[in-house]
Amino acid sequence: MTDANPALNRITQFENRLTKATYNPGAIIFRAGEMDDTAYIVRSGEVQIVTENAKGQRVVLTTIGPSQIFGELARMNERTRTAAARTEHGCELLIIRPEQIEALLENAPPFLRFWIEHLVSRVIDLTKRIG
């Protein structure tokens, strides 16, 4: 018997070291411009990553579902949040603290860390161009 979500199976291997949080429908998880370097994994439900365009209209950049991570950009570039995160229908999240990410990246090969930082910079640049 195979599981339909192998990524979620991998997460269960370390989720006992992470804090769980539940958000009600309509909850704001974080706002654009906030200083925060916590990352999240969606355990259940969905999270929308949103920003405002030049006309002040809300733009949904992406919807994050189970086993996907979000909020990692602020940590990687030690910047403020580039977009907001909210849930329309509620969700359960696993919280990844900055020190947990650092511990994992400490042992990463230098090129891998460089590549990750480059990709993060590119995503941040693209997010700014939308707004």
Image (tube, rainbow, N blue to C red):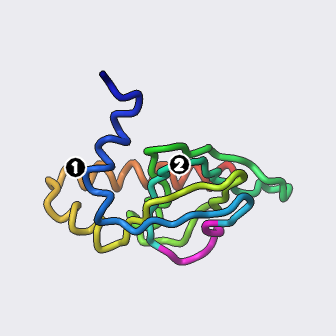
Camera-side residue of 97 and 93: 93
Camera-side residue of 32 and 64: 64
Q: Residue at x 54, y 53 (%)?
A: 125
Asked if residue 85 lies left or right of residue 125, the reply is: right
Main secondary structure along the magenta-highlighted residues: loop
Mark 1 residue element: helix
The quadrant holding residue 99 is: bottom left
Q: Which residue is mark 1?
A: 112
Looking at the picture, how far across and down is residue 53, in whole percent? 77, 54
Q: Residue at x 19, y 50 (%)?
A: 111
- Give the magenta part as a residue range: 29-36
Q: Residue at x 72, y 52 (%)?
A: 88
Camera-side residue of 14 and 33: 14
Asked if residue 1 lies left or right of residue 55, the reply is: left
Mark 2 residue element: strand
Tag count: 2
Q: In the image, is residue 71 part of the stretch drawn in magenta?
A: no
Q: Which residue is mark 2?
A: 44
Looking at the picture, how far across and down is residue 117, in whole percent? 34, 56
Looking at the picture, how far across and down is residue 34, in whole percent? 59, 75
